[in-house]
Amino acid sequence: MYPQLLTYLMEFIKYQDQVIRTLLTLLIGKGMFEKPEETPVNKPYRKLQVDDLPIIEALQKHDYRILLTEYLEKNGKHLKPVQRRSNVKTAVSTSMSCPKCGAQSDYLYANNGGKGQYQCKVCTCVFNEKSRYLKEAILKCPHCSKTLEKVKARKDFDVYKCKNNDCSYYQRKLNGMSSKEKKQFKKDPQAFKIRYIYRQFRIDFQPLSKSTPQKPKVDLSRLYVSPHTLGLILTYHVNYGLSARKTAALMKDVHGVSISHQSILNYENAVALTLKPYVDYYPYELSDQFCGDETYIRVNGRWHYLFFFFDAVKKIILSYPVSPNRDTATAIRAIDDVLVKMKDIPKDLTFVVDGNPIYLLAQHFFAQHDIQFDIKQVIAHKPQNELGQ
């Protein structure tokens, strides 16, 4: 009887607690009770396929003045500018010029009735102000040589797709489907990747370029404390893991040195920024095999991702950037921190990582800058609370 009574009382207490919380929320507001602590998301990765690089065809540039001279020699008369009609829709801005030969607006005219397409009378180039024709190169499919079309704009890159139905890549993928897959493809075509796709990155990042070191707030050469005192502060604060306030109290009580906790934080930052270039660019003798992963750390009360790479043979940690997001830009930065420490990039350079698709995108980004390496993805099951330990 007593166990049943205890069970009933516990259920009744839980019910009363819910009623009280609901009433207080209605009377006072939603922000009264603490929200549950957010934990990093740990979801299985989606499969990502990265295709070969496209054919990059540079736009052939001309000089309209040379073309006008050639026209005069060939036809015995000058090429006349465009005769304008009094139509606002087909007007051409005086600041516009041809992206191919540089001809001024006098030789340009609206090609599709004022809908944004223009043509140059000198070189016959058809272009649009916001189209790919104003770019430095045209991207073409490596399988059928057809021009790629921009289909999506992501955070860090634009997605280009080959929409040619006669493309060998498309036909090979389509013919390789089973009858079951073809039925599913008719119902949900987005679940299959059957066309060539290229991702052009828009990340403002130059690989293998050493960044200018950040200057500390405190100049270590002008400190009032002695090097011995600075060593004691760093020993207590860094080696023994004491907080800045406890370190300040210890320096006062034991050594008789009065110092604020903020000064200790400034000293720590100044020493770290001074030593970082020596650690980053130390002439390590590295192998050609590296491993990388991510884990979670707390930064100012919020979860962040710590990316780290180490030499699989020498067991040297070479990269450790921290980011609030698990994104491609941070993966690129983490790999670049390894590459800048090498005198020459080995031919058989390999990075062993998990199944996160951002590393494949990072590999594609470096390939666009003529930096080649292999990515080996090892997909292993991780318990929900493994990374946070």
Image: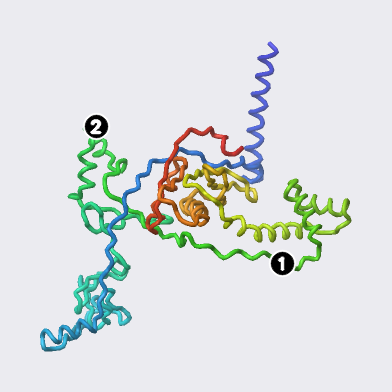
Quadrant of the frame with the N terminus: top right
Most extreme residue toward the top, as rendered?
1
**Figure coloring:** rainbow
Q: Residue at x 24, y 59 (%)?
A: 147
In this rendered view, identify the residue nearer to me: 270 or 17. 270
Residue 311 locus on image (x, y percent): 53, 45
Q: Residues within 10 Å of mark 1 (few under 14, many from 20)?
A: few
Counting every numbered tag in the picture gives: 2
How far is disc 2 from disc 1 in space, using C-alphas?
Answer: 70 Å
Q: Nearer the viewer, mark 2 or mark 1?
A: 1
Residue 365, can we see it?
no
Residue 177 locus on image (x, y percent): 23, 36
Q: Which residue is mark 2?
A: 180
Q: Amino acid at mark 1?
A: Asp
State the SS at label 2: helix
Most extreme residue toward the bottom, as rendered?
77
Q: Residue at x 76, y 53 (%)?
A: 244
Q: Amino acid at mark 2?
A: Lys
Q: Residues within 10 Å of mark 2 (few under 14, many from 20)?
A: few
Residue 217, compared with residue 84, is above or below; it is above
Residue 353 locus on image (x, y percent): 47, 42
Residue 41, compared with residue 110, is above or below; it is above
First along the sequence among labels 2 and 1: 2
Q: In the image, 371: left or right of 231?
A: left
Q: Which mark is residue 351?
A: none
The quadrant holding residue 36 is top right
Q: In the image, 290: left or right of 255?
A: left
Q: Which residue is mark 1?
A: 219
Residue 24 locus on image (x, y percent): 66, 40
Q: Residue at x 19, y 78 (%)?
A: 121
In this rendered view, identify the residue nearer to me: 120 or 320. 320
State the SS at label 1: loop
